[in-house]
């Protein structure tokens, strides 16, 4: 009798735990900029040995660093992997209002209350070119990156800059430089080793191409090419 009661209690606990969810790996089906629809990558095993595939989860909040008026985002795509963690209580009230709320449902650790953390990857989808010497923001193949190491920042890829730029300290340019628009130098001296070519040069208000030299009782010709 005692053993029978023990088995009943054990069975009830096992049954209850089988519907309690904490965290599971998942794969994205779609993303709308705030929530994902994702499929759980671990199937459920029934007591009779039957394997059941869990249905896709919808309206799962995607987690990004976001605080103090700043955010960091990545373009989540179908097929991306991550981890879904499940809240211990119903989050519907808070989710809809952003305010404190009582649980609107008595469910606990339920599949309906998931939050998706992108970037938890299986071995086949791991970061293949991992940067070990600092912080790296990069494409998967490392063809483009911004890397922060001790005392240095490395950038690879084309750069489009919108807004003003201020350089404090020396700048060394390796390669060609193409200026589109005006360029103004205030103070200091500009020097070059090599050839300078320009369609028009004006120095001190004098046009280099069209200026003439006035000699005694004579005006020289314009410079010749």
Image (cartoon, grey):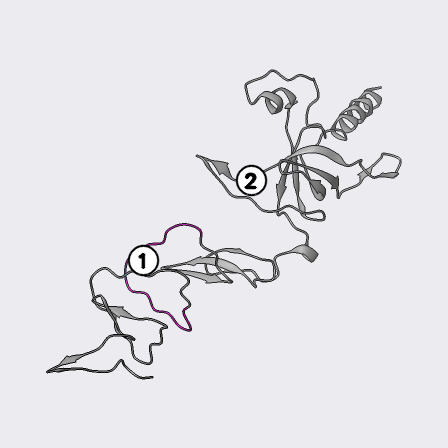
Disc 1: CA contacts within 10 A as few (<14), some (14-19) or many (>=20): few
Give the residue number, with chain letter if any, for mark 2: 64
Mark 1 lies on a secondary structure that is: loop
Residue 60 falls left or right of residue 156: right
Vertical relation: 51 (above or below) 169:
above
Question: Percent x, y for residue 91?
Answer: 63, 24
The answer to whether residue 147 is magenta is no
Mark number displayed over residue 167: 1
Question: Percent x, y for residue 177?
Answer: 40, 69
Give the main secondary structure, helix, strand or loop, of the magenta stretch: loop
What are the residue bounds of the magenta stretch? 162-177
Vertical relation: 152 (above or below) 162:
below
Image mark count: 2
User: Which numbered disc flags the more N-terminal residue, 2 or 1?
Assistant: 2
Q: Nearer the viewer, mark 2 or mark 1?
A: 1
Residue 56 falls left or right of residue 174: right
Front-most of 198 and 78?
Answer: 198
Q: In percent of the image, x 81 and y 26: which residue is there? A: 11
Front-most of 14 and 161?
Answer: 161
The answer to whether residue 165 is magenta is yes
CA–CA distance in space, label 2 to label 1 = 32 Å
Q: In percent of the image, x 48 and y 59: which residue is there? A: 159
Q: In percent of the image, x 61 and y 15: which residue is there? A: 102
Q: The N terminus lies in which quarter of the figure?
A: top right
Question: Percent x, y for residue 224?
Answer: 31, 84
Q: The C terminus lies in which quarter of the figure?
A: bottom left
Vertical relation: 101 (above or below) 58:
above
Residue 10 figure quarter: top right
Question: Percent x, y for residue 87?
Answer: 63, 28
Mark 2 lies on a secondary structure that is: loop
Q: In percent of the image, x 89 and y 35: which residue is there? A: 48
């Amino acid at each position: 009798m005692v053993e029978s009661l023990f088995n009943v209690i054990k069975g009830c606990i096992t049954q209850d735990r089988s519907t309690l969810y904490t965290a599971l790996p998942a794969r994205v089906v779609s993303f709308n900029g705030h929530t994902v629809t994702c499929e759980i990558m671990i199937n459920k095993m029934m007591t009779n040995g039957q394997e059941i595939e869990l249905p896709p989860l919808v309206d799962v909040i995607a987690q990004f660093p976001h605080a103090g008026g700043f955010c960091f985002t990545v373009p989540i795509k179908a097929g991306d992997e991550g981890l879904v963690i499940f809240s211990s209580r119903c989050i519907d009230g808070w989710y809809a209002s952003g305010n404190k709320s009582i649980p609107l449902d008595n469910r606990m650790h339920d599949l309906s209350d998931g939050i998706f953390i992108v970037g938890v990857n299986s071995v086949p989808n791991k970061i293949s070119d991992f940067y070990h010497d600092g912080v790296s923001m990069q494409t998967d193949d490392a063809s483009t990156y911004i890397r922060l190491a001790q005392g240095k920042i490395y950038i690879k890829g084309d750069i489009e800059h919108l807004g003003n730029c201020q350089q404090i300290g020396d700048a060394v340019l390796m390669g060609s430089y193409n200026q589109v628009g005006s360029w103004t130098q205030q103070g200091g001296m500009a020097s070059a080793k090599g050839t300078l070519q320009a369609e028009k040069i004006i120095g001190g208000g004098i046009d280099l191409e069209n200026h003439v030299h006035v000699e005694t009782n004579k005006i020289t010709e314009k410079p010749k090419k």
